[in-house]
Image (cartoon, coloured by chain):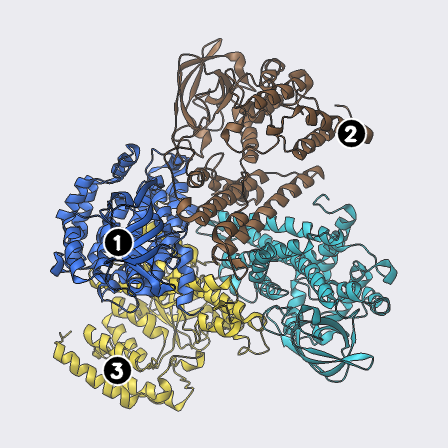
Chain colours: A cyan, B blue, C yellow, D brown
Amino acid sequence: MALVINEEQQMLKTSAKELLKNRAPVSALRLLRDSKDSKGYDPQLWQEMAEMGWTALNIPEAYGGLDFGYVGLGQIMEEMGRTLTASPLFSTVWMGATVINLAGNVLQKESLLPAIAEGTQVVALALEETNRHNPSRISTTAIASGEGYVLSGRKVFVLDGHIADKLVVVARTADGDEGINLFLVDSKVEGLSIERKWMMDSRNSATVTLENVSAELLGEEGEGFAALEKMMDIARIGLSAEMLGTMQEAFERTIAYLKERTQFGVQIGSFQALQHRAALMYSEIELCKSLVIKSLQAIDEDSSDLTKLACMTKAKVGETIELVTNEAIQMHGGIGVTDEEEIGFFMKRARVAQRTLGDYHYHLDRFAKLNGF
Amino acid sequence: MALVINEEQQMLKTSAKELLKNRAPVSALRLLRDSKDSKGYDPQLWQEMAEMGWTALNIPEAYGGLDFGYVGLGQIMEEMGRTLTASPLFSTVWMGATVINLAGNVLQKESLLPAIAEGTQVVALALEETNRHNPSRISTTAIASGEGYVLSGRKVFVLDGHIADKLVVVARTADGDEGINLFLVDSKVEGLSIERKWMMDSRNSATVTLENVSAELLGEEGEGFAALEKMMDIARIGLSAEMLGTMQEAFERTIAYLKERTQFGVQIGSFQALQHRAALMYSEIELCKSLVIKSLQAIDEDSSDLTKLACMTKAKVGETIELVTNEAIQMHGGIGVTDEEEIGFFMKRARVAQRTLGDYHYHLDRFAKLNGF
Amino acid sequence: MSTTTQTDIKTFRAETRAWLEENCPQSMRSPYRSAEDIFWGGSKPEFSSEDQKLWFERMRDKGWTAPAWPKKYGGGGLNKAEYKVFKEEMARINARPPLFSFGLMMLGPALLYFGSEEQKMKYIPEICRGEIWWCQGYSEPGSGSDLASLQTRAEDMGDHFLINGQKIWTSYADQADKIFCLVRTNPKAPKHTGISFVLIDMNQEGVTTRPIKLISGKSPFCETFFDNAKTPKENLVGTLNDGWTIAKYLLTHERSGIGLMPATQSLQDMAIEEIGLENGVLADPILRPQITRWMINEAALKLTTERTMDEAKAGQSPGAKSAFFKYYGTELNKEQSEMRVVIKGFEGVEWGEDYNDGKLARGMCRTKGNSIEGGTSEVMLNIISKRILGLPSR
Amino acid sequence: MSTTTQTDIKTFRAETRAWLEENCPQSMRSPYRSAEDIFWGGSKPEFSSEDQKLWFERMRDKGWTAPAWPKKYGGGGLNKAEYKVFKEEMARINARPPLFSFGLMMLGPALLYFGSEEQKMKYIPEICRGEIWWCQGYSEPGSGSDLASLQTRAEDMGDHFLINGQKIWTSYADQADKIFCLVRTNPKAPKHTGISFVLIDMNQEGVTTRPIKLISGKSPFCETFFDNAKTPKENLVGTLNDGWTIAKYLLTHERSGIGLMPATQSLQDMAIEEIGLENGVLADPILRPQITRWMINEAALKLTTERTMDEAKAGQSPGAKSAFFKYYGTELNKEQSEMRVVIKGFEGVEWGEDYNDGKLARGMCRTKGNSIEGGTSEVMLNIISKRILGLPSR
């Protein structure tokens, strides 16, 4: 498949850029942050996104979706990465809808996917239990009880946890990876407590405690971990698309600053040392672009390379976004470290995105293991 | 102790610089190489070095040495690093004399150290058996037989092996590190075959095969490995001093070239990108200088930090010499990759020195282990 | 200065040790843990504890807030050998400096070197007694690394200068009593010339300040505005239009000040505790060599500081080497603070609601400024390449 | 050119496959393993095997040494769709190119674009038939990256040019029949102007060559000296004094040629074989992430080549992007060849007595030139920053 987006995808990207420029520039995130907004996102904007179909792109037509595919959804992420837009798109659509579609039974899909497509349901994934990404180290327990299960444990870094209607909780019914299963938990249920955390990127994250919480198994027992793994690879690619947008925006702003700012009587962009560092960043970003488009296509094609591609992409994008956001601040000089200038927001978002679903250390190591060394 | 050399050491360094400039510039190594010299070094120069006392600096007065210390010997190495001088100083004095002095009994010291001090005995260490430095992986066997031992095995990368009068062979009498011991082998003895290898740096290295070779235990059984380890740390520091000289010379030649060479109508040293890369190299070299002097002093002070310092020094120096010699060639441009220009010799020496007694991968890993992680 | 014999020094060491043992409160015998642990002095002094006050007053009364400065200006009058012993004895018990201020760090040294006798007698004793909080007015919006392009003007009005303009990155300007300041006194002269070094009272109409918020949150930095502010002409330090000489002298002083910050827990311990070992090695195989390289570089940098001092003692001039220390130290500091964030994972990127939360993330953000303030890394590399390596300008 | 329907293409594929199956000797169905496997053509052709000769002659007779060039100049006349199929079918059986030459790679494309009809009819068929070995005369001692500073002069003598000067890095000049050459035809004009592109016979008095030895050992590079050499004026290609346009066109062609060299064994396999695994991971914990990063970068660079071609097909111009490919590809190549030396340890730094020994060490040395020849990495970064990013010149 040609490594370019088609006309329809381009149109979607253009319309996303337009909406986000008007409705969700970086200043919107600043406002959410400074007002300590209780929701951490703009529900009206979220509704507009749903009206534009963004919440339905990866959902099959049978469940009220558009079945447009992940390449298109990736274009939206890239544009949201540029504007640092806070919304439940990643938690609900990339993670929630994907895992329900992969693992859920028909009834579960029927009850949840149309609501996600309409933008009326926010879904959060409760996965992590330690400070570092580790999907196999699950100690939250799930014990069969009557028709359902009872869950107990503690989850950290639950993205959009405090605004979710439903949680998909990863819990253990037995030892080993096969003993790890997925459960649907209503956010209002007894025994569940959700504590919002204030993060560096001013986005939503929560710590969730479950004490004998009633839950419904998502899909079949024994199949949860495989679905979780595939969903994580898909979500890593989506997040990489967002990070690609973020690094491109930070880079372009920096190049613009280098052209505009004068020191010692000349534009600082005329200093060769900065030029070469800019050219290096350009090169790394070019590589990231290729990995992201290839990986997005791999989702839609259900390619057997999905795992390796997701791993490579998150690793390379993670490494590059650190380089680019650090250089962006350094090249902005004194103004770059003030809160008034927006460039710092990109660095902060980069750090949290880096941690999400495995940082570049995690994925470098994983890639070596996938290759048998 | 102040991290500077004293007046006596400075005098020694100055006289070494003088001798080497006249008798052993880089062109001397080229000549040895192009004539495929059968010895791979200049015995007359070696005799002059001995007359200047270089071969006696680390040998106790009781055994005909000067007991001048390793800081002084390090200054010689640094100067020899600048001129890429081929000589048995490292094999015979840094490794041979050191290990005999550490492990040998009085009789052995009396028979060997004075001869080394006089420059009439070349000693080589036969340690490695695999392609990568690994002092614990010894399979050469030593079996007690009569008053002595009989050795069988194959050794690679034996520096100065084909010109040595004596070999110190590392062989195993039992399992584990304690089972590793040191043996003196005469280079003319039956069952020993020595094959010279032509190395990238045009210095001497050989593959040594032992088939039931008669050998004498150096010192006491069970104490060999500890002596070997200490000797290796000392030798790593000596080699680092040489590498420091090599990187400084390559760097200074490059800076001179940057000032001399014009392109696009200006000196290429006025290009800021090259200036910053030069400043980076300067900084790394400064760090190397401090580690080398501190480590040399640690030998003379018999410091308990010797192991950590040797490890840090070889790691940092190894990393920096690769940076500097690569940049040196790149900054010399087209001329830098011709054999006619001498700068390539520095890169080639760097690569072999890097491998000797553990490259920077080895020592980074070792340093982490020494620190319990 | 008097010379000191070995016996004198022994006596001095014994006396100092005894005095410190008796006078340094236990709570003052540990490194600073937070900004509150530093006493800055000033006309409205704020102590965070009784011990801090006691310790400051005892040391002040002995002249030991500035132990090596001449006694006649309020210093301790220690000679080199004594000062070395003093520092060793302080370090032995981890005693905190009783007073920290830009007066001690910067203005004092500059006055001792460039000031008139009147200025020394007037200002240095105040600094030693911690009575005046001085701040520094160098950078301006738009000047950045190109400090000499500064625009704040001081007009000669006969008996005083009339000052108009704006300064930025003036640390603690909102709390300071006075400012030492670079101003343009000859607008027609080329950049480096025509600049003077003057002292200005902050407590006057015509001087206003505004704090700057950083990416790490609140900060000591301010913007300072001069709108027809005044200062008597005797507050000119050094020669008119030759302030650049003093500025350069002080920049070198400042650079050597910004270096590695003390960290509460070593990187290595933090990593072992948080990430753990597998088969005896750190369970993050990528972080492991990064930490190792950092440890080696940090140790080597410390040794290089030591070596440079030893070389200076042996008569070798350090030249422009402070640029190297500034560059390397701040880059190392940025690295270690990034690694701490990585080690702590999700917790490392927590920000919290309050400035005292999210220390790792905020600390990392703060270090981003290290390679910008006091001369950017790029300027340091320029200095190394031109002044140390002698590479040509275009 | 004719358009081709899907049916035509299917037929073409079937025919091509059958023809290749029948005509390509088995020994020609594997990638080049060493320099000897390449047939360069020339007036004194040297074949390393009978199969090589047979394969060349069969392909030559079909016009498939230059499959996409027009038939009237001796090419295969394939249209785009057919050429794509041709390449796919060649790749399917790993068929080696039957002829490799600077005529095919560089001069031919330049003549097709800039040459007169007479020049095309005269020179291109010879190139396709591999009868003439062309070499390239661009660089001069002292010109380096600043190619436009060249000094070799061609004086207008009425019917011919008189050529004096010296070229360097002329690959295989000692074996070549002719040279395409940049010369200065107007010494008064500024650098980029006043340069012309001419074709010169090497077999004449006044042209001498001397091989250059590299740090890797012997090399195809030579120095070439012109001492009153001559060439008829009809051998001027393009417009007089406008040779720079052709030079730039060709430099771009050359850059896209220097890229990753095929390696016999993957880094990863070599490392596993030589170093081995411990607890399932490579026993060199520092090399492991280096190899991993390299593998990811290499895959990403390949994808970027693919993406750039797809974008070009979709109408987006690649602009100056060849500078990026040249830069990144050569840096990756240097890295992998350094890693091979590291993996092989002591054996990796063996040099041996003969040029065929010490392949790893010599190979590593040879790659050092990759980031210099065809435009240094620094020049590539300059091009990226100015032509792609639009950063200003000083």
3 and 1 marks in contact (CB < 8 Å): no
In the rendered image, the residue lying farthest to the front is B146
Whether labels 3 and 2 belong to a single chain: the reply is: no
Can residue B288 be seen in this snapshot?
no
Label 3 marks a residue whose chain is C
From the viewer's side, name the closer residue of B19 and B39: B39
The residue at which mark 1 appears reads as: B215
Q: Amino acid at mark 3?
A: Gly
Q: Which residue is mark 3?
A: C63
| Rendering coords of residue B370 (x, y %) | 39, 67
The vertical placement of B300 against B358, above or below, is: below
Residue under label 2, please give it: D9
> Circle 2 sits in a helix, a strand or a loop, which is it?
helix
Q: Could you tell me which residue is drawn at 26 percent across and 52 percent down? A: B214
CA distance for labels 1 and 2:
77 Å
Residue C371 spot, x, y in % from top left: 44, 61
